Image (cartoon, coloured by chain):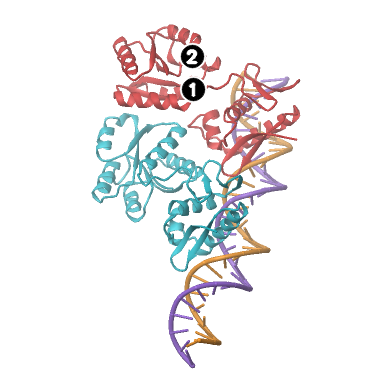
Chain colours: A red, B cyan, C orange, D purple
Amino acid sequence: MKILVIEDEIMLADTLAEILKQNNYSVDLCYNGEKGWEFIQTEVYDGIVLDIMIPKMSGYEILKAMREANINTPVLILTARSEMEDIVTGLDCGADDYMTKPFAITEFLARVRAVTRRKEYILPENPSMGNVFLLQQQCTLSCKGNSISLGKKEYQIMEVLLNNCSQKVPKEQLIEKVWGFDSDCEYNNIEVYISFLRKKLKAIEADITINNTRGLGYYLEVLND
Amino acid sequence: MKILVIEDEIMLADTLAEILKQNNYSVDLCYNGEKGWEFIQTEVYDGIVLDIMIPKMSGYEILKAMREANINTPVLILTARSEMEDIVTGLDCGADDYMTKPFAITEFLARVRAVTRRKEYILPENPSMGNVFLLQQQCTLSCKGNSISLGKKEYQIMEVLLNNCSQKVPKEQLIEKVWGFDSDCEYNNIEVYISFLRKKLKAIEADITINNTRGLGYYLEVLND
DNA sequence: CTGGTAAAGCTTGAATAAACCTTTAAAAAT
DNA sequence: ATTTTTAAAGGTTTATTCAAGCTTTACCAG
């Protein structure tokens, strides 16, 4: 497991790195945002410990940049208690968890474990199933010649389904992943997008369908005939 | 699996209950400590989700009262970030785990699973008997090749029977575990579901049956011939 | 040891409720 | 101005509950 720590309080940063090393992580360490962003781009990490208030490039900027570059490494945000309101922003930007300083070492380790466990497997760049694949850069769903462009939400939903292709994904989970955990998005909303997606899948003659098991959630299935 | 949620933020409480229900737990819900303590005394739960800062009787008071009364149901504490220092107190009072608000739904579910699993009754994730086993994620009953999907109630009833495979489970207890103790569900209702389940067991050629001893309850039995 | 009777359990079909689907239109965002 | 997102409405399907008639079991009286 490889962790990147981005934290400008040098003492704290060194301590965290030390703790992680003692727990058999390999650790990269940097003291400002710009450097951190370089690391993120050049290296694949299993998790990132990220302070928000750091010089040169804030934690949020990094998160946003990561998101845009479709780097899905799990992120644990560190923040002072006075910045509490910003946490929602952080989670919306794609952070997976946060901790306020100061904190207990055991809790820190627990959260690092939780956060990295959450994304054990590597998510493919352009997830695919059957003859269909999702091009993230063009926000496009394509399939032997045919292709069709997706809206942002459509794209995100399709991505979640593709990344959980063997599982049934409950609406709750879709809402959490696509709209954010504190959203009051209605179920109907998802149903609408599922309907859109099904239409588009049919339009490009995809060999997969979106199915649903009542009460459990949506899942993809390959048609075979 | 039956969970009690004690949380005074009504929106959050309802959301948690909803999420749990969708994951095949049955849930009791209350918005203050006093009511919560009543529930705990009158009902047996597999786990309790407990906010600390709640009206009438604090989470700690409940915890303390529980342990004094030798009620060992596992407890997952919810707490605002600002009450962090109190967590140690909570764990000292006998809580099994805690989460700070806000949190990710997946994490919440993971922690509920963990906390309830910790209970040493060792309830298997996919309980089984004879050649039959219950797949939690699929809500499916399966048996060497054959498998059949269950409705939510069917699933929960089957789960209770499998987890008490050496015992006769009275209707009262089934109602309590599946519908909730304050339900006015008729016995007939259970009989209907038992009937459904027997039909499905036969359909997949299971080697177990659901039997009944008049006045005592239902139990599973392995066929041997 | 019958046979009658009441309670408990079984089964089925119909009614109700909940979950899901689709379309359309309004609102927001770009 | 166009695309994307949300909201609303009505329709379909499936799960759940209700109701009724039937079968089995236990028990008591004759």
Write down the quadrant of residue A78 in the picture: top left
Lateral position of residue B133 relative to residue B67, left or right: right
> Disc 1 or disc 2, which is closer to the eye?
2
A61 shown above or below B107 = above
Q: Residues under labels 1 and 2: Cα distance?
A: 17 Å
Residue B8 appears in view = no
Q: Chain of mark 2?
A: A
- Residue at the (43%, 32%) spot, across then down: B107
Q: Which mark is residue B202?
A: none
Q: Amino acid at mark 2?
A: Val
Q: Quadrant of the C terminus of chain B?
A: bottom right
The image shows residue A144 at horizontal and vertical percentages of: 74, 22
Location of mark 2 (residue): A44
Location of mark 1 (residue): A94
The image shows residue B63 at horizontal and vertical percentages of: 28, 44
Write down the quadrant of residue A148 in the picture: top right
Q: Looking at the image, is mark 1 or mark 2 earlier in the sequence?
A: 2
Question: Which residue is nearer to you in this view: B198 or A45?
Answer: B198
Lateral position of residue A134 relative to residue A17, left or right: right
Lateral position of residue B16 relative to residue A185, left or right: left
